[in-house]
Structures are given as structure tokens and as C-alpha cells.
Image: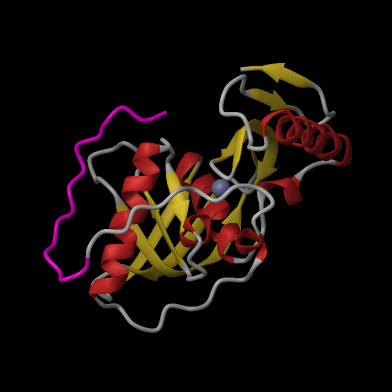
Amino acid sequence: MRGSYSYRPRRRYPFAVPTFTIRTYGDPVLRQRAAEVTELDGSLVALADGMVEAMYAAPGLGVAAPQVGVSKRLFVYDLDDDEGPRAIVNPSISESDGEWTYDEGCLSVPGVYFTIVRPRSVLLAGWDLDGGEVRIEASGLPARLFQHELDHLDGTLLLEHLEAPQRKAGLRILRERQLADGSPARTDSVTIDAAGNAVDR
Ligand code: ZN
């Protein structure tokens, strides 16, 4: 999903960039509502840079702070366009419109994708790391990403957006993988459609 590893932290600050591993399904931090960010300081920038590095290492398109074990309302993303990585602080979605079906995956639920319908377009609001106001009208993939990452900040995983047979099939696969080697497998990706049918990717 990612081809570019050219990211370097853009700022200087007296904080070491932390090294994170992505928390996976079953970790309680993924089920908590994250706290509002109240201070935009160097430690938050260092956190964001660490999240970006974890996102590129995975690789993934976006990472929310709870996925690295930090219960704060912040996510980073990189849609592999000219903009490079971005961080959104205290995000909210104020408008949504339409419907879009997409095979959605999550770094915290590795190897399993789910066909999920969500609004096609959203209006995302929040702040950047400098305290500047951010408003993004998004449609398609960026809109999907914003909804997915915002869910993480509310303690919601994509598993909560599934149809009943799809959820049942997904949980069975996750359970089998965890039984097999104690940690979720990163290979043999499957997509589970709304009817609960698993298709190799
Ligand atoms: Zn996710």
C-alpha cells in the first residue's frame, strides 16, 4: 500500500521520536475513548512523528494515537499524494453525504479486510500541530480514512460496522489466527464480504 519511505521529521525539538509498535485487536486501549489534546507542544510533535514512522513501517495509510497505545485525540495519515504526512488534532466530522462501498482494512486487525458501506463524503475539522485550523472536504478514500481514524479515537474498531454474518466470519478468522501462533498473522490477507464470505486478496 505504501511505496515511499522518504519521510524525515521536519522540525527540531528536544524530544526523541518514540518507536511504536501497532496495538492489535484485543488490546484494551483500542476500546477507550481518547482524551482531547489540550496542549500543542514539542512532545505532541514527537508523538506524531513516531506515529508517522510506525505508519510507514506497517505500512498503512493512517494511524490513530490509540493504535500506538496513546489515548489522545490525534491521528496521522499519508495518502501518497504530494502533501506528505499530515497530523490532525482533536478532529470532528460535521457533515457527511452519500454512500460508498469499500474493502476496508485496519493495522490493528491485520490481514482481514471487510466490505463496508459508509458515507462517501465528509467535512473534517480539526487542528494541525501548529494550532492552525484545518477544514477538509473529502470524498472517497480520504473520507473513508477520516471516518476510520476518528472511530479509533472513540474506541470503535471497524468490526463494529459489520453485518452480522460478516462479523461472525471475521471474528472466527481472528480467533483462529490468534490460537495458531499467539499473535495475529500478517500473511494470507482475506476480504470478508457483507454476507460473511471470505475471498483471498
Ligand atoms: Zn484502524
Which quadrant holds residue 120?
A: top right
Q: Main secondary structure of the magenta part?
A: loop
Q: Residue at x 69, y 33 (%)?
A: 115
Q: Which residues are magenta?
A: 1-15
Q: Is residue 143 left or right of residue 88?
A: right
Q: Residue at x 52, y 61 (%)?
A: 66
Q: Looking at the picture, does residue 69 appear above or below residue 169?
A: below
Q: Is residue 75 left or right of residue 41?
A: right
Nearer to us in this view, 158 or 30: 30
Q: Residue at x 22, y 40 (%)?
A: 82
Where is the C terminus found, in terms of image quarters?
Answer: top right
Q: Looking at the picture, does residue 189 appear above or below residue 85?
A: above
Nearer to us in this view, 149 or 59: 59
Asked if residue 180 is among those painted magenta in the image, a careful observer would answer no
Point out residue 152 in the picture as x, y percentages from the top left corner: 58, 58
Where is the N terminus found, in terms of image quarters?
Answer: top left
Q: Looking at the picture, does residue 56 appear above or below residue 189?
A: below
Point out residue 55 in the picture as x, y percentages from the top left corner: 39, 44
Nearer to us in this view, 121 or 115: 115
